[in-house]
Amino acid sequence: MSWESWVVETISRALAFGTPLLLATVGEIYAERSGVLNLGVEGMMLMGALTGFAVSMGSGNPWVGILIAGLVGGAFSLIHAFATITLRANQVVSGLALTMLGTGLSGVIGRAYEGFPLWSKLGRIDVPVLSKIPVLGPAVFENQSPMTYIAIGIAIIGWLVLFKTRIGISIRAVGEDPATADSLGISVPRVRYLCVMIGGVLAGVAGAYWSVAYRTAWSGGMTAGLGWIVIALTIFAFWNPLYGLVGAFFFAAMRVLSFRLQNWLPPELLKAMPYLLAILVLIVVSRGTLQKRMGAPSALALPYTRGED
């Protein structure tokens, strides 16, 4: 294989693998920017993957499957929102419970769909003119899922809304100092519910992409730690959707390259990578000084009740 073919193949596969990571990371960034840590991303992605596959198989339209998967992910995230925002439960415990619930529920319901291929697959597209650019064209603009370009668009729009609009100012204010935001007339519960639901919708869509466009099949636990990678990417992106875009595809490229490194690195180490990253994230979240240095929202994982400091 020539170096040109090798580069094209690596970039193309990284874009495909990084798409669900990017979608879920943008959603988690919004949730955490509002002050809510959601460790239930893995569970929501699995529910989205199952829903997307089942609805696509039943309807014959993968876009319908992706849409319904997003709605299911959003509805599932409301469990976490109710527990942490309304009931003020511990966010780490609630998120872990959500992951266990999504993993178990999708595994039980999904048994009926295991072993069946998906006939109504999400097609791939070529971008006219741009696909003719040497090296970059075939790698980025040829034979890619439309969901990849949609994910990139969502990341850019997410950055614009978060940092260039009044809505974004409200979200960041709630995540930094909910008491002050409340005194200015911003509804802290409403903003947090909305952001957690955005995170759930995008996690559900990310899971559906995995089963409808990437794997085109369903199996229990098929996300295999992607949700934990998303949690890590959110921190490594400094809670910025544009950095999340770079981080998601960079990690995906490293993942693609890791398969070529199995002759030099133990495969057990490569498989353990998501969980090692998750442990690192939990350490960062639990250390206030590290949070401040990395630019984490000041009120991240802290419940808020009006009238209390």
Image (cartoon, rainbow, N blue to C red):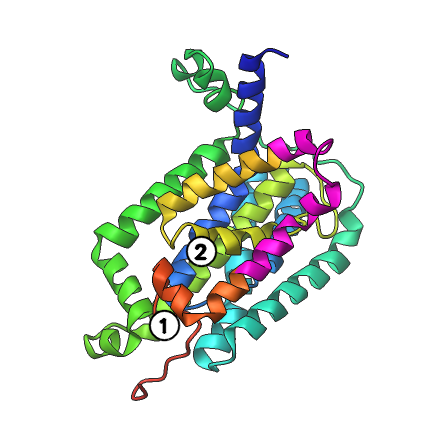
- Give the percent coordinates (x, y) of residue 148: 48, 34
In the foreground, 254 or 49:
254
Left or right, 247 with respect to 44, comes to left
Q: Residue furthest front?
A: 264
Query: What residue is rendered at 50% in x and 58% in y?
Result: 200
Q: Is residue 124 visible?
A: no
First reached walking from the N terminus: tag 2 or tag 1 = 2
User: Which of the image's four quarters has the C terminus?
Assistant: bottom left
Q: Residue at x 41, y 78 (%)?
A: 303
Q: Are marks 2 and 1 in contact (CB under 8 Å)?
A: no
Q: Amino acid at mark 2?
A: Ile
> Which amino acid, mark 1?
Ala
Give above or below for 242 relative to 72: above
Report helix, strand or loop for mark 2: helix
> Residue 143 colored magenta?
no
Q: Which mark is residue 299?
A: 1
User: Residue 268 in magenta?
Assistant: yes
**Any mark on residue 235, and which?**
2
| Residue closest to the eye, 282 or 102 | 282
| Magenta stretch, residue numbers | 257-280
Answer left or right for 72 relative to 266: left
Relative to residue 43, is residue 152 depicted above or below?
A: above
Residue 91 place in picture, x, y as percent: 51, 73
Q: Is residue 133 visible?
A: yes
* Secondary structure mostly taken by the magenta-highlighted segment of the chain: helix
The residue carrying pointer 2 sits among few (fewer than 14), some (14 to 19) or many (20 or more) residues within 10 Å by Cα, namely many
Is disc 1 placed on a helix, strand or loop? loop
Q: Residues within 10 Å of mark 1 (few under 14, many from 20)?
A: many
